[in-house]
Image (cartoon, rainbow, N blue to C red):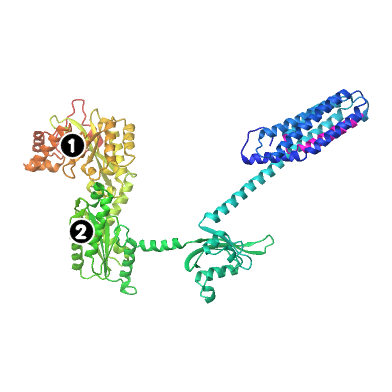
Amino acid sequence: MMGLGSDRGEAAARVLAAQLRSGDNVALLRHAMNLFGLIFLWQVFGGHGASSRLSLFSVLLILSIVLNILSCSRRRSSGYGGLTVADLRSQGLGGLLHGLLWAGCMVSMPTGHGPAELVAHWTLISCVMVCGAISFAATPLAATGFLLPCVAALPGMFNASGQLPLLALATSYALSLLVGCFIYARTFTRQHSASVQLEEKSEVVSLLLREYDQGAPDWLWQTDAARRLNGVSPRLAEMLGVPASAVEGALLVQVLAGSAWDSGLFPAGLHGLADHLKRRESFSNVVLPVEVKGLTRWWELSASPRYDDAGAFLGFRGVGSDITEQRESAERITQLARFDALTGLPNRAHLRDVLDQAMSGGGVGRTANCAFLMIDLDRFKAVNDTLGHQIGDKLLSQVARRLRHICSGSEFCGRIGGDEFAIVIPHSGPEHAIDRLAAAIISGLSTPYQVDQHMLFVGASVGSAVAPQDGVEPEALIRSADLALYRAKSEGGGMHCAYEPQLHAQAEERRKLELALRDALEKDQLHVLYQPVVDADSAAILGFEALARWTHPEMGPISPAKFVPVAEEARLIGPIGEWVLRTACMEAARWPDPVRVAVNVSAEQLTHPSFIAAVVSALGQSGLDAHRLELEVTESLFVNAAAGSLKILDQLLALGVQLSLDDFGTGYSSLGYLSRTRFNTIKIDRSFVVGASNNKAASLAIIRAVVTLADSLGMATTAEGVETEAELAMVRRLGCRKVQGYYFGRPMSAADALTLFPRDPLRASA
């Protein structure tokens, strides 16, 4: 507003141009007043010895008027475009020049000849100030520059004794004019800013409407009060395939009806549209077929009634869009939504519909005799993880083709998802018929597969349930088949299990165990025991293995063999494992250096993004040196191992943490990964220790091979489950460096473990 800041964009420039234009429009009044005042001064003071001063004042005043006129002309010729804050400051400088000239006139003109000259002089000055304030009202910088010098010169004009009241009155008058200029300028700026913003918004809306109508897939339309089209847009005419003039003024319903207008056989959508128009109510997403050049297109229309300021109905205005392609796509999607895209088999939703129909075929209030089989592939995850999802998808396609061939009768087969399939038998026969079908499925799906250059071997497990005895509702029947499949998988896979009532009880027991396990950490029901690991030759304690135990207040002690699988299925092994890690580190920090603590880590824990941070946090909070922590992983880690798992092992080694490979030789041995990861210890399972003590050649050979392999790789070996002196002598003879088992100590509490550390060299007694 004042012009003291910097340029602030196009909107501010337009307001600035309006300020300068307003001042230029009334500049003529100021110039005329200046010339009239000049003539008046010559008439009043020309004969009082002020000719020389008047001459100088006249020249300077006329020169300033000319400069101002030239500046106004320049701005008008440019159309007030490209103006900046500098132009506003230039006008302010012009106002200051005028103010200084008139201030000089006020103090230099003689006023001692009588009150008449003083009154005349003040009258002239007040008129000049009013005209200046009017012309500079929109530009407060110029108004300030003009009026302040005049205010400063008033004491020089009213300098006689007794003129103080006149001086005060004149000063108040001049300052009032200045305040009025500021008030007007503020109002002026706000109004023009609002006008500029409104104009910009109108331009944006108009532009958007033009772009919407010209380039968007939708179009605008409107009718008059008689429901006839008016203002037909080019886009609407293009969609109708006729010139805009051909449908201007035509009834909207007639245009949409096409050839059906004569027969009166209108589609339901058009009837609904006509009702909305008749009742003058808003409507949206009305879908109807429209005939365009002999072809049927599907349109979607929405509109609202229009009224003028007096409330008179003007017609409708709305938007339309061609949804033919979307409608056809939706129909295709509806069809595809019932079949699996990969295998072409019916999907879960389709299977459920068929099962619902089959179970409702027994009549009102009765459940028909039908069967539901769930199939899960064995060892499929290993194929996906080792060869990739592309090979896995091709394998699933071959499985689907075999299922179609096996289910060639009334059976309805489909894919539930992943590597799970299902079969609905609408009219189940005797039990042995289901057994025969399940056996055929297991046999057919277990035959080797040739996928690209790979010969793949997978099996199948089947769980079955029969209605109504195993479930009178579809959900119950599916649940029963799922429980039967779970049992088939838990018993090794490659077999068929029919549902039995005790399966539900077992599942309920697992569910209760899971719920109880979720509360175990919070209620301090878990505790950690420590089993010694000793030097095979000297029997010195080298460390302890931390073992999680659970004692429930009602169920009592619960075996790890029972609750650990539940924890893994319920994804609770992570928080439980982290708690064991923190607890073991805190206890180990109380043991003398270099006694270590070994903590078992599951594959799920190891691959969790926060595992490294959890290890660092446990070491930091306990103060335990990293080299005294040993993390035990099993060979199952390498079944689904990815590069990320090996990187995590490398990061742990970089921290100084020791790594131990547990149960080596009992699972999926992978010498390749063993050579890539620098394990510190390989643990030999008790089954080999027992076999070797009984002089079984295979067990002896395995232990010798493991010891030789570990020695060549710079790793130690730990024999687990040593319980007798004979077993100890045997593992010593075979070269095992460390021993763990009941012979040296059962799992014990942290307090008992602490008592095993006398000042003498650490020894354990059998």
Q: Which amino acid is tagged 2?
A: Leu
Which residue is the site of mark 1? 682
Of the residues tagged 2 and 1, which is closer to the observer? 2
Q: Which amino acid is tagged 1?
A: Ile
Q: What range of the chain is rendered magenta?
A: 117-140
Give residue 542's position: percent from left, percent from top: 20, 31
Q: Measuring 22% from the left and 71% from the top, which residue is drawn there?
A: 429
Give residue 422's position: percent from left, percent from top: 27, 61
Q: State if disc 1 and disc 2 touch (CB < 8 Å).
A: no
User: As displayed, is residue 132 above or below residue 294?
Assistant: above
Q: Is residue 163 left or right of residue 553?
A: right
Q: Nearer the viewer, residue 674 or 346?
A: 346
The image quarter containing residue 357 is: bottom left
Q: Secondary structure at mark 2?
A: helix
Q: How many marks?
A: 2
Which residue is the site of mark 2? 445
Give residue 650's position: percent from left, percent from top: 27, 35
Q: Nearer the viewer, residue 468 or 585?
A: 468
Residue 348 in view of the camera: yes
Give residue 314's position: percent from left, percent from top: 64, 64
For the residues labelled 2 and 1, the Cα–Cα distance comes to 38 Å
Whether the magenta-drawn stretch holds residue 135 is answered as yes
Q: Is residue 170 left or right of residue 620?
A: right
Query: For the C terminus, which image quadrant?
Result: top left
Q: Nearer the viewer, residue 734 or 508?
A: 734
